[in-house]
């Protein structure tokens, strides 16, 4: 048993609307249609699948499924139950009362001779091995996307035309009717084609992902280089400022060398400079005191003093 979405012609039968605003329409006739062969038994047993269905502005298009449609696309509906009776050829057909949406009522009535209705519903069936035709034996009454849609292209029967357009699931529908190719082989070919498409998409996705990764990596490297350069500039500026402060403090040579080393290590030398100034001041005061008392260390002509760990 094979399931597929069926698209078949429907026709506007009545010449004018009834008092309640509905038009009598023929949804589908017995015989061979654009998506399969429909038997009188099928129509008798399963026509109720079209009771109260909505009508949209055309079928889903391209690769879009029926789930992409929304309420703004509604053009009308079938009011109440459908029924079966013979058409003008004496064949069984499904009929219903079509009520256009007020927004489209005038336009549908004006162009009814150039417009048509086409069923859209899930069904099942089998392939006749002798003819290759798809014999429909069931309409899905629970299909939430079943509809009777307004279409443009005229078909073979009816004033409100048959639509031969197959959009949703079109590739599978056409391939199953291709003569000379066994169904299993056709299915394998379709799977292979789909796999090729998937592989191509995956390859393209990988290329795009690699390009994005390279670009992000380049941005990160550039940001790191800029950050490093900024850090070097800031460190150099801080060192130059520290050297200037040390020179302006007019410290003893050993003090200056010690503070320069600290500045090179990136330490904050401001408090060290203040401490060094205090040490130097204390040393100079001690020297003055010793000289005022006339102290002589070993009769040397040169004098050396050690104060607070510093030799002066």
Image (tube, grey):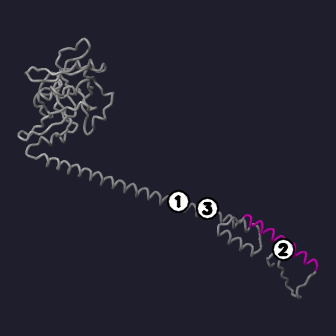
Q: Is residue 51 above or below residue 270?
A: above
Residue 283 disc label: 2
Work out how far the residue at label 1 is from the one at label 2, CA to CA, in angstroms. Answer: 47 Å
Q: Are the two marked residues, 3 and 1, in contact with CB atoms closer than 8 angstroms?
A: no
Residue 280 found in image quarter:
bottom right
Q: Please indicate whether residue 170 sits to the left or right of residue 230 in the image.
A: left
Q: Earlier in the sequence, mark 1 or mark 2?
A: 1
Classed neighbour count for the residue bearing mark 1: other residues with Cα under 10 Å, few (<14), some (14–19), many (≥20): few
Q: Which residue is at the far front?
A: 45
| Residue segment shown in magenta | 270-293
Q: Which residue is mark 3?
A: 234
Residue drawn at point x = 9 percent, y = 23 percent: 91
Residue displayed at 21% across by 25% down: 48
> Main SS type for the magenta part?
helix
**Residue that badge 1 annotates:** 226
Q: Position of residue 287 (x, y in %)?
A: 87, 76
- Which circle's residue, 3 or 1, is located before the other in the chain? 1
Q: Quarter holding the C terminus?
A: bottom right
Q: Quadrant of the N terminus?
A: top left
């Amino acid at each position: 048993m094979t399931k597929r979405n069926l698209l078949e012609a429907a026709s506007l039968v009545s010449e004018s609307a009834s008092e309640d605003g509905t038009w009598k329409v023929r949804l589908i006739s017995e015989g061979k249609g654009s998506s399969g062969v429909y038997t009188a038994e099928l129509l008798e047993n399963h026509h109720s699948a079209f009771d109260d269905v909505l009508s949209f502005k055309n079928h889903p298009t391209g690769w879009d499924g029926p789930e992409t449609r929304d309420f703004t696309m509604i053009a009308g509906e079938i009011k109440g139950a459908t029924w079966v009776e013979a058409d003008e050829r004496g064949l069984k057909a499904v009929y219903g009362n079509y009520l256009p949406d007020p927004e489209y009522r005038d336009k549908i009535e004006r162009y009814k001779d150039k417009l048509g209705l086409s069923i859209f519903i899930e069904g099942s069936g089998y392939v006749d091995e002798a003819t290759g035709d798809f014999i429909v034996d069931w309409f899905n009454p629970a299909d939430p996307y079943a509809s009777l849609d307004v279409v443009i292209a005229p078909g073979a029967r009816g004033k409100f035309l048959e639509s031969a357009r197959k959009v949703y699931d079109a590739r599978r529908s056409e391939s199953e009717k291709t003569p000379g190719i066994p169904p299993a082989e056709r299915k394998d070919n379709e799977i292979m084609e789909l796999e090729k498409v998937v592989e191509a998409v995956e390859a393209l996705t990988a290329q795009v992902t690699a390009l994005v990764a390279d670009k992000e990596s380049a941005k990160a490297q550039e940001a790191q280089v800029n950050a490093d350069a900024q850090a070097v500039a800031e460190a150099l500026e801080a060192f130059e400022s520290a050297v200037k402060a040390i020179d302006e403090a007019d410290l003893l040579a050993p003090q200056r060398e010690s503070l320069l080393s600290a500045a090179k290590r990136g330490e904050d030398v401001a408090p060290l400079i203040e401490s060094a100034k205090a040490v130097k001041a204390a040393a100079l005061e001690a020297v003055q005191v010793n000289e005022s008392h006339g102290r002589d260390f070993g009769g040397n002509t040169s004098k050396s003093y050690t104060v607070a760990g510093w030799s002066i």
